[in-house]
Amino acid sequence: MDDQRDFEVVVIGAGASGIGAAIKLRAQGVTDFAVLEKASGVGGTWRANTYPGCACDVPSALYSFSFAPNPQWSRAFAEQPEILDYLRRVSADHGVDPHLRLGVELTRAQWSDGDQRWHLDTTRGRFSARILIAGAGPWNEPLIPDLPGLVDFPGEVFHSAWWDHTIDLRGKRVAVVGSGASAVQFVPHLQPEVTALHLFQRTAQWVLPKPDHAVPEIEKRLLRAVPFAQRALRGIEYAAIEALGVGFRNPWILRLIQRVGLAHLLLTVRDPDLRRALTPDYTLGCKRLLLSNTYYPALTRPNVTVHPHAVREIRGSHVVGADGAESEVDAIILGTGFRILDMPLANLVFDAEGRSLAEHWQGSPVSYLGTTVAGFPNAFLLLGPSLGTGHSSAFTILQAQLGYVSTAVRRIRELGWSSITVRPDVQRRYNNEVQGALTGTVYNTGGCSSYYLDSNGRNSFSWPWSTGRMRARLAVFDPSDYIVRSPADRPAEMT
């Protein structure tokens, strides 16, 4: 494997997506494949993100593959070290590790009509593949804001996704830029250690109580001994979050639920000025739903100042807010999220004519079923455009996609097709359907600006229906949706 360069399938990324893809390939007898991973180990975002308090905001029983349940979760909402251990164990137990090529970063992938293969340039030389599966995911590349003066800041600066554990923040004055999912988790851990914490909040977030708790040993024993019990728990939790999902399609329901968030804020933040600054002015669910029992209490401590403004610039050692107020700090932590819709992978994958995926998209990612893109034969995206939800587990989405991709790969191999490419008209009709259905959802009507909206103001992230409907759509691979080519580059019989 170490010397092999040409494969039937190449998978990009060894996070949950890449591991899942590799397992599905092995299950259908594909052994001629490699998983290219730029880092030194598996785990994806759960390997990279090690900030204090990093944890899942989806119940643990759902945040796993259904074919690899984990009866040993220590908490109802698992934390980063435990999730990483789970992914490492699944990779090893399901035979993925021998297929890994670690420390190999993709720099370019281009389809060739001549030999009907993908040709990949990497930091470790060239590879080729008949089929390309992109599992880099949307939570791969941190978003670094273009703040004037940031490069000249004399203190420490790092993004929460690249947490620098060598820096001792105890007793320092720290600015946190951003108040999203990561900041909500690490701020409560950071607050007791620092002399002063300045939180720059561009937009107030809805934060609901987190129903987290340690899993009792007796429950773990039951889940180990009775597999049906774990399936039942997974089913109950799935039904609960799908019920919540109804609200995302009917925003009036979420306006009722947000009363819980207001009560949570009222009970934990007694200062009326601070409470006013932390009160959102949009409908719950318009942005990512956040859960925490410790975030609001941390913001009430004497050493914390909440600035309800974006950062305008960095001037020497001072962070200047949009209101002109200055705060002198020793360190800046960027809790500014990820490049969700302008993912770097789009600049690395090219069609036969040399046009990149980013050039095709022009700022608005489109695909068919979040999985295939017109003009890119034998290429599959995992956790692609218009599949995101505000409530469900990424594993639910991923497994639905993996079933679709597995069927497509099997048909390619069994019927001897050289390539399949989704028809542009099929992709266009599908995306028109998605955009039409999004018009009444909270994602589009909730009154906020979120990462769901791309640079053109279009919602390229969200799935407008239930995950049950998603699973049903992805359960059927219809060859008539595709331009199918035989080895002689003639349309093959689509049977």
Image (spheres, rainbow, N blue to C red):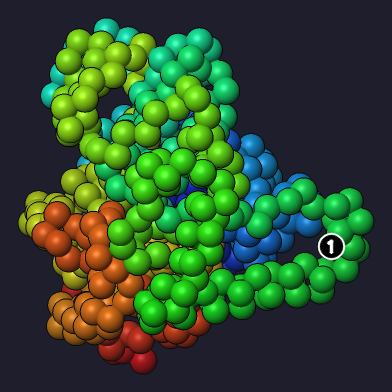
Residue 93 seen in this snapshot: no
Where is 464 relative to 336, above or below? below
Q: Residue at point 23% right, 20% down?
A: 326
Q: At 51% from the left edge and 44% from the top edge, which residue is drawn?
A: 269
- Left or right of residue 202, residue 476 in this image: right
Q: Residue at x 51, y 53 (%)?
A: 266
Q: Mark 1 Cα within 10 Å, few/some/many (few <14, many 20+)?
A: many
Residue at numbered disc 1: 223
Residue 64's image quarter?
bottom right
Q: Nearer the viewer, residue 202 or 301?
A: 301
Q: Residue at x 49, y 67 (%)?
A: 259
Identify the amino acid type marked 1: Leu
Number of numbered discs overlaid on the protein picture: 1
Please state if 157 lies on the left or on the right of 320 as rendered. right
Q: x%, y% of residue 188? A: 55, 33
Q: Measured along the vertical axis of the image, is residue 66 above or below residue 112?
A: below
Q: Position of residue 2 (x, y in %)?
A: 49, 34
Task: Give the image location of residue 474, x and y in percent.
Answer: 43, 79
Judged from the image, the secondary structure of the residue bearing numbered disc 1 is helix
For the residue pair 367 and 120, the one nearer the viewer reads as: 367
Up the image or down, 361 lies above or below 235; here it is above
